[in-house]
Amino acid sequence: MKSLSDKEIKELIIKCWMTHDGMWFLHCLRKTGIKMTNKINKAASHGLGLIEAKRFKKLFGIENINTNNELKHFIDKIFEIVKADFMKFSYDFSKPNVFHFEMHQCFAHDGITRIGVIDQYHCGIYDRIDGWFEGLGLKFKVSPQIKECLKHKGQNCVRKYTFDFPELTVEHKVS
């Protein structure tokens, strides 16, 4: 039997988790319809983010996030854990107190399109990220406010989070 590298194990675990997420969505959709499934999915994603924030704080030995640099470090560490190679997104902190996130090719969009309800889908991915920031006790503004899938509407899937940190700037971009 072949031994797996840490990276191969991580990729497999994340793919299995995303398959579970997709199957949960599909079966919930069949039982309750798209309106209730969207509502449950968004609440579950947000709740996951809240719990993850607490777990990651403990794992990384972080008490509080008080600066843009501390937030950048925290987000970098989270994505080292939760991002798989098939997830095609980038983020940066290149503007003062701003976290910019862009989904280039969205696995959720692709999966929801395959099951035929993309025109009614309300994205839950950003609810998870919102949960991280709320779980950290951070005050932030979000632009744009979204419900429907931006990619389905022919738009770029981007989101900007603006924080009220005293620090002026940090340069950092990840693809």
Image (cartoon, rainbow, N blue to C red):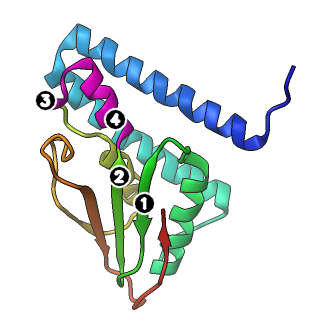
Report the residue at 42% width, 26% height from top.
21
Residue bearing mark 1:
90
Mark 4 or mark 2: which is in front?
A: 2
Residue 54 percent location from the top left of the image? 53, 52
Q: Are marks 3 and 4 in contact (CB under 8 Å)?
A: no
Residue carrying label 4: 108
The region drawn magenta spans 106-120
- Distance between the Cα atoms at labels 2 and 1? 8 Å
- Sequence-first tag of 2 and 3: 2
Using a 10 Å C-alpha cutoff, classify the residue at mark 2 as few (fewer than 14 neighbours), some (14 to 19) or many (20 or more): some
- The spot of residue 33 in percent (x, y) is 17, 15
Q: Nearer the viewer, mark 2 or mark 3?
A: 2
Q: Secondary structure at mark 4?
A: helix
Which amino acid type is shown beneath numbered disc 4?
Answer: Ala
Quick check: marks 2 and 1 in contact, CB under 8 Å?
yes
Give the class, few, some or many, for how many residues have Cα within 10 Å of label 1's Cα (few <14, many ≥20). Answer: some
Q: Nearer the viewer, mark 1 or mark 3?
A: 1
Could you say which disc has been placed on residue 120 in the image?
3
Task: Give the CA distance from mark 1 to mark 3.
Answer: 25 Å
| Residue type beneath disc 3 | Gln
Q: Is residue 65 above or below residue 97?
A: above
Q: Amino acid at mark 1?
A: Ser
Q: Residues within 10 Å of mark 3 (few under 14, many from 20)?
A: some
Check if residue 111 falls in the magenta segment: yes
Image x and y of residue 132, in percent: 42, 54
Mark 4 vs 1, N-terminal side:
1
